[in-house]
Amino acid sequence: MEELEKTMYFGAKPAIVNKARILRDTMTYYEKLLWDKLKWKQISGLRFRRQHPIDIFIADFYCHTARLVVEINGEIHLMSDEYDNGRTAEMEKFDILVIRFTNEEVVNDIEAVIGKISLIALERTESPPWGI
């Protein structure tokens, strides 16, 4: 594995990498809707990965260039604020920004979701907070 690929996983163990592979085959309807807009560098030429391992977590979508995680929160997340906040805090230790959208936002206003992702991704690539 080349060095870039090693660093973009932030120490994820093989078990997490394998679980991510499985999750790519079982994406939710909402994840598939968003993936159709993120794949193939459709947002400002940036590459997003789906079900990407980061340390002990698996992000719904991740752009390494922008160090940006995009999460889609379904109903289960209504009862898991504490877990989600802890997970976000752990990713922030790697200078990763986590943004979250609800299933309803994705299905009802996908263009607004894409607009926000694009704006944040561009801001982070133009002025990376982690330094280069």
Image (cartoon, grey):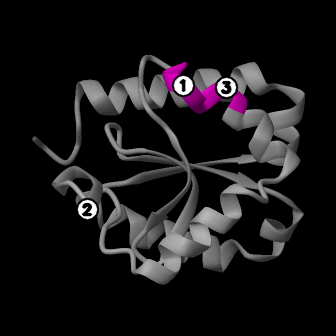
Relative to 112, say whether 35 is above or below: below
Front-most of residues 87 and 57: 57
Q: Residues under labels 1 and 3: Cα distance?
A: 8 Å
Task: Quadrant for the N terminus, please.
Answer: bottom left
Mark 2 sits on what residue?
6
Q: Assign a secondary structure to mark 2.
A: helix
Question: How far across and how far down the image is residue 86, in percent?
Answer: 52, 76
Q: Amino acid at mark 2?
A: Lys
Please name the residue shown 77% across and 41% down the image.
32
Few, some or many residues within 10 Å of mark 2 (<14, 14–19, 20+):
few
Please name the residue shown 31% across and 67% down the image.
10
Front-most of residues 71 and 31: 31
Task: Quadrant for the C terminus, please.
Answer: top left
Instruction: Say which mark, if any, is on residue 98.
Output: none
Question: How far across and how far down the image is residue 29, in percent?
Answer: 87, 46
* Left or right: 53, with 92 as reference point: right
Q: Amino acid at mark 1?
A: Trp
* Left or right: 73, with 52 as reference point: right
Q: Assign a secondary structure to mark 1.
A: helix
Mark 1 sits on what residue?
40
Q: Assign a secondary structure to mark 3.
A: helix
Q: Which span of residues is magenta-colored?
A: 36-42
Q: Residues under labels 2 and 3: Cα distance?
A: 26 Å
Q: Residues under labels 2 and 1: Cα distance?
A: 22 Å
Mark 3 sits on what residue?
37
Q: Main secondary structure of the magenta part?
A: helix
Q: Contact (CB < 8 A) between labels 1 and 3? A: no
Compare marks 2 and 1 and give the one earlier in the sequence: 2
Please name the residue shown 55% across and 31% down the image.
117
